Image (cartoon, helix red, strand yellow):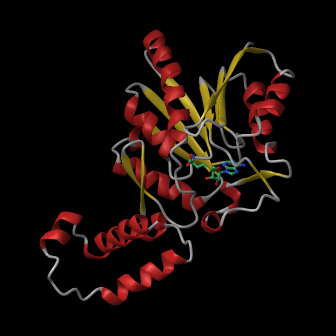
Amino acid sequence: MLAQNIKTAILLHEFLTEKNVIWLHLNYDKEFDIEFELVKLIKKRATNYPLEYIIGKASFYGETFLVKEGVLIPRPETEILIDNAIEILNEEVAKNGKVKVLEIGTGTGIISVMLASLIKDIEIVAVDINDIALDLAKQNAIKHGVEDKITFIKSDLYENINNEDIFMTISNPPYIADDYKLPDNVKYEPSNALFGGKVGDELLKRIIDDTYQRKIKYLLCEMGYDQKRPLEEYFKDFSVKSHSFYKDYEDFDRGFALEFKF
Ligand SMILES: C[S@@+](CC[C@H](N)C(=O)[O-])C[C@H]1O[C@@H](n2cnc3c(N)ncnc32)[C@H](O)[C@@H]1O
């Protein structure tokens, strides 16, 4: 805990001074005029306000992404969703020379930006209902030099989407039950990025329905650790060629890949 607090104080110091930790060690005997500001930020952090919102950035997939209040902070487990997608998408690119993907609920844009960075011949449409998220995701696409490969659209799921040629839909949608008591630090994050309905899996099920109706071959989603059984049951309502579930870094069920048969 103490080590974590010291690390946080160092990160906040780096944020305020724009100097890295090596500079700090080399100048340990210097007087700083930011003490007041630093104490203010440490106090803010002590209320469980996320560090990422204070410093305006987060690490994900070994890269740095801009974050801000009003948009969900990236979680490491979403890297696994991306890895699973890359495997399928690379096969498609090898076969057809290109691939088109839809991301539902792009948030900071981490999924679309990483796919666009890692796959050469990819075209992505990324949607969200949140204007702050769409604006931030665009900034992240520019930061990572992939803005030409991603079109950002404000859309409630598929509402404003022309699904022509979409090979895969990918999503980390809100999937927490509405009455779930969030830990203190998560309370600062937007509720429409977290809560998926009374049970939690309602939005996931709408995405499954809509993706099938639009005859999109693949659907890859993140989900809650306790949603494998109900979703597996739900898959039986559709013509499915294959499906698989994957676990996160802590060995909890965390997502699925679904291939429809048309
Ligand atoms: C769990 S966050 C995921 C953000 C980002 N993709 C990630 O993995 O960190 C879910 C995102 O879905 C968006 N969202 C919620 N309901 C939506 C809907 N009906 N249509 C489109 N996006 C939606 C939220 O605004 C939020 O940005």
Judging depth in this view, the residue of 172 and 19 nearest the camera is 19
Q: Residue at x 50, y 58 (%)?
A: 135
Q: Is residue 88 above or below residue 24?
A: above
Residue 73 placed where, x, y %?
A: 53, 56
Q: Is residue 166 visible?
A: no
| Quadrant holding the C terminus | top right
Judging depth in this view, the residue of 149 and 84 nearest the camera is 84
Judging depth in this view, the residue of 2 and 104 nearest the camera is 2
Looking at the rendering, which quadrant does residue 168 occupy? top right
Q: Residue furthest top?
A: 95
Q: Residue furthest front?
A: 2
Q: Is residue 83 above or below residue 21?
A: above
Q: Residue at x 56, y 52 (%)?
A: 107
Number of marks in the rendered image = 0
Q: Is residue 69 above or below residue 238?
A: below
Residue 224 placed where, x, y %?
A: 71, 42
Residue 101 placed where, x, y %?
A: 55, 30
Give the side of residue 124 with respect to residue 245, left or right.
left
Residue 230 placed where, x, y %?
A: 83, 33
Looking at the rendering, which quadrant does residue 186 occupy? bottom right
Give the side of residue 2 with respect to residue 33, left or right.
right
Q: Is residue 257 visible?
A: yes
Q: Residue at x 68, y 43 (%)?
A: 160
Give the side of residue 157 with respect to residue 109, left or right.
right
